[in-house]
């Protein structure tokens, strides 16, 4: 395990994960995870939400597909990856995603019966 590039993220899924299976048989799940910070600005409490792209591969992707859906709280452990590409206007873009090594989850109270 690389200890120099570690990320732990605790947040909520903003939508159902997307699942892909490639011709090679490899499986991938993409999750959109929201984290929120609260702070005071001018004596008002402000909520700032950030969205994070999380990728799960193989058996972890299977678990995501079978057990996790929108609204679930997740704890993601993984590493940060940077991707570079050139968009349709010829401008170089950078994106970041978390490649998950493990995902813990809990069903939100509003979905529990």
Image (cartoon, rainbow, N blue to C red):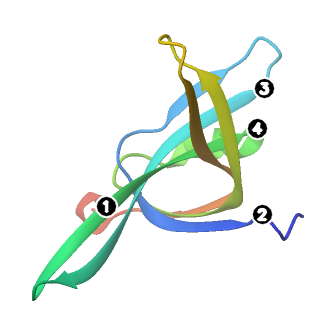
Q: Mark 4, mark 2: which one is toward the viewer?
A: 2
Q: How far apart are marks 4 and 1 (CA)?
A: 29 Å
Residue drawn at point x = 55 percent, y = 37 percent = 30
- The numbered mark, 4 or 1, whose residue comes first in the sequence reads 1
Q: Residues within 10 Å of mark 4 (few under 14, many from 20)?
A: few
Q: In which quarter of the image is residue 38?
A: bottom left
**Which residue in the protein does label 1 denote?**
49
**Does residue 41 sit above or below 47 in this rendering?**
below
The residues tagged by marks 3 and 2 sit, at their Cα atoms, a distance apart of 24 Å
Q: Which of marks 1 and 3 is in front?
A: 1
Q: Decide which of tag 1 and tag 2 comes sooner along the chain.
A: 2
Name the secondary structure under disc 3.
loop
Residue 18 in the image: above or below residue 91: below
Mark 3 nearby-residue class (10 Å; few <14, some 14–19, many ≥20): few
Mark 4–mark 3 distance (CA, rounded to whole Å): 6 Å
Reading the chain from its start, which is encountered first: label 1 or label 3?
3
Query: Is residue 100 something that shows in the picture?
Result: no
Residue drawn where x is 33% and y is 64% of the image: 108
Element class at badge 2? loop
Q: Which residue is drawn at 43% across and 64% down?
A: 11
Q: Is residue 17 left or right of residue 44?
A: right
Q: Write down the residue under mark 4.
A: 58
Please name the residue that numbered disc 2 is placed on. Answer: 5
Q: Residues within 10 Å of mark 1 (few under 14, many from 20)?
A: few
Question: Marks 2 and 1: in contact by CB < 8 Å?
Answer: no
Q: Nearer the viewer, mark 4 or mark 1?
A: 1
The reply to whether the C-beta atoms of the residues labelled 4 and 3 are less than 8 Å apart is yes
Q: Which residue lies furthest to the bottom in this view?
A: 43
């Amino acid at each position: 395990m690389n200890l120099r590039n570690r990320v732990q993220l605790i947040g909520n899924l903003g939508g159902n994960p997307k699942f892909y299976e490639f011709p090679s048989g490899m499986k991938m799940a993409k999750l959109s995870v929201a984290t929120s910070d609260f702070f005071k600005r001018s004596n008002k409490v402000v909520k700032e939400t950030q969205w994070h792209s999380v990728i799960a591969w193989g058996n972890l992707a299977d678990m995501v597909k079978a057990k996790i859906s929108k609204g679930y709280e997740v704890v993601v452990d993984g590493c940060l990856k940077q991707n570079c590409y050139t968009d349709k206007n010829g401008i170089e873009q950078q994106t970041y995603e978390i490649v998950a090594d493990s995902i813990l989850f809990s069903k939100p109270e509003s979905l529990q019966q």
